[in-house]
Amino acid sequence: MTHRSFEFTHALCRTPALSVTDGLRATDQGDPDPLVFAAEHAAYVSALRDAGCDVTVLPADDSFPDSVFIEDPALVLNGVAIVLRPGADSRIGEAAALRPALLETMADVVDLQTDGFVDGGDILCTDDRVLLGLSARTTAQGAEDLRPLVEAQGYRLDILQTPPEILHFKTESSLLDHETVLATPKLAASGAFQGLNVIETPHGEEAAANAIRVNNDVFVSAGYPRTADLLDQAGYAVKVLNTSQAALVDGGLSCMSLRYSLALAA
Ligand code: CIR
């Protein structure tokens, strides 16, 4: 079965919580400003709508500072949501908190049963494969327990290794089209993208690798003009969005939505 990995009819987002100032981060560059974050998030939601998605925006959940990063507690394949088990202590409860909304919006909901962990940010889907990078948040046990759920949706699961300094596999990679990814030189050098073309981010613009392809558009974070030019020259319709506040808590474009298609669901 071949899927259409960047065609989406819908997206699910969550408004950033005021508690996002307590969000996890590898290095402290200052707290995000919740008002600026809200404005950047609203522009992101608008861009998803402009790209053709019917977007549901869930209310903020202050009990989980990182809950705006809705991609991490779930994976959607064929309109079916798989409730994951996030690997950070402060985030594990996001999965159960998200479940009711998944039941309302998705074609079906199944639960990953595991003693391990899987974060959605470690998962990059192509047309026929789910690339899953083991990381500080995603364990080998979680990955193996996810395998049957992925295969049940007609995808092959490739378990890879995210280099140790990288938070999530998709922090440094994104799908651009049916056979092309954008990735940092470091992640590309790990050999993760067998059978795919790779466009590498220019030196100093590694953070631009967390882009997203949504229907005809490729969203790229502001502040990375050489990446935007490179993608523009390669023929992609680039849309630049501000992610300055998400970046302060190690978030980017992919993590702020669960993108899915109901029209294409089997
Ligand atoms: C965290 O460390 O979990 C959040 N502060 C950022 C999560 C970003 N999510 C992602 O890259 N998929």
Image: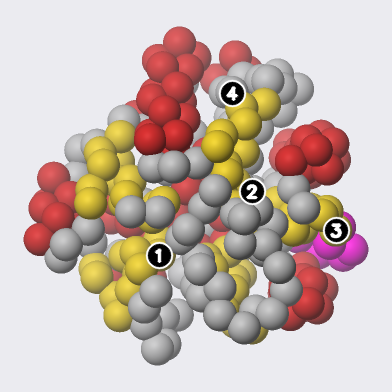
Work out whether mark 2 precedes mark 3 in sequence or the reverse, and give the earlier one. 2
Question: Alpha carbon of mark 1 to alpha carbon of mark 2: how far?
Answer: 17 Å
Work out whether mark 1 precedes mark 3 in sequence or the reverse, and give the earlier one. 3
Question: Alpha carbon of mark 4 to alpha carbon of mark 1: how far?
Answer: 25 Å
Label 3's element?
strand
Q: What amino acid is at disc 1?
A: Leu
Work out whether mark 1 precedes mark 2 in sequence or the reverse, and give the earlier one. 2
Label 2's element?
loop
Nearer the observer, 264 or 133: 264
From the image, tell me which residue sits under label 3. 110
- How packed is label 1: few (under 14 Cα within 10 Å), some, or many (20 or more)? many
Q: What amino acid is at disc 2?
A: Asp
Work out whether mark 4 precedes mark 3 in sequence or the reverse, and give the earlier one. 4
Residue 218 is situated, as x and y percent measured from the top left of the image, at 31, 51
Q: What amino acid is at disc 4?
A: Thr
From the image, tell me which residue sits under label 1. 175
Label 4's element?
loop
Q: CB at mark 1 closer than 8 A to ligand 1?
A: no
What label does residue 186 carry, if any? Answer: none
From the image, tell me which residue sits under label 2. 72
Question: Alpha carbon of mark 1 to alpha carbon of mark 3: how far?
Answer: 25 Å
Q: What range of the chain is rendered magenta?
A: 111-117
**Quarter of the figure with the N terminus:** bottom right
Left or right side of 76 for 54 = left
Q: Quadrant for residue 46, please give it.
A: top left
What label does residue 15 carry, if any? Answer: 4
Residue 219 is situated, as x and y percent measured from the top left of the image, at 33, 46
Work out whether mark 2 precedes mark 4 in sequence or the reverse, and give the earlier one. 4
- Select label 2 or label 3 by which is in front: 3
